[in-house]
Image: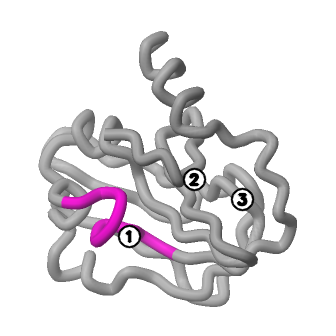
Amino acid sequence: MVPENLFYTKDHEWADIKGDTATIGITDYAQHSLGEITFVELPAAGKQLNVHDVAAVVESSKAASDVYSPVTGQVTEVNNELEAKPELINEDCCKAGWIFKLKIAAPDTKHLMNASQYEEYLKTI
């Protein structure tokens, strides 16, 4: 499952960019690789992030994995539902399982992949 309207990173984050806001989560590939998500450490609202800064941590029955910011900006919102129900990421990683939102500082997306590029990248793993 690789939705067409999102941008992707090689670290398996997705970004839904609308105007100056980016909603960020992990991809279906990432959630499937991790297994059952048991805990999500969310970033603090107001935190400033640069591209590839560690923004959050997702823990599963298999491992803990850092979630990197795919764009530069300031955290404006976090998905507090994940505190009580981290399995939302497994159930619906690209919608209800989003992790945080950023107000984008620089709208540069050249380093991100579109859906077809990400699907090709997945074939190399």
Give the residues in magenta.
Answer: 92-100
For the stretch drawn in magenta, what is the main secondary structure? loop
Q: Is residue 35 above or below residue 118?
A: below
Do the CB atoms of the residues marked 1 and 3 lie less than 8 Å apart? no
Q: Residues within 10 Å of mark 3 (few under 14, many from 20)?
A: many
* Residue 23, image x, y percentages: 53, 70
Q: Which mark is residue 68?
A: 2
Residue 32 vs residue 99: left or right? Answer: left
- Residue 108 vs 20, above or below: the answer is above
Give the colour scheme shown.
one colour
Q: Quadrant of residue 96?
A: bottom left
Residue 96 magenta: yes
Q: Residue at x 57, y 33 (%)?
A: 10
Image coordinates of residue 107 in percent, x first then y, are 82, 63
Secondary structure of the residue carrying tag 3 is loop
Binning the other alpha carbons within 10 Å of mark 2 as few (below 14), some (14 to 19) or many (20 upward) gives many
**Disc 1 residue type (three-letter):** Glu
CA gap between label 2 and label 1 equals 12 Å
Judge by depth and name the residue closer to the eye, 73 or 123.
Answer: 123
Secondary structure at badge 2 equals: strand
Specify the label residue 41 is tagged with: 1
Badge number at residue 111: none
Q: Toward the viewer: 70 or 83?
A: 70
Label whose residue precedes the other's in the sequence (2 or 1): 1
User: Is 124 on the left or on the right of 48, as rendered?
Assistant: left
Amino acid type, callout 3: Val
Q: Secondary structure at mark 1?
A: strand
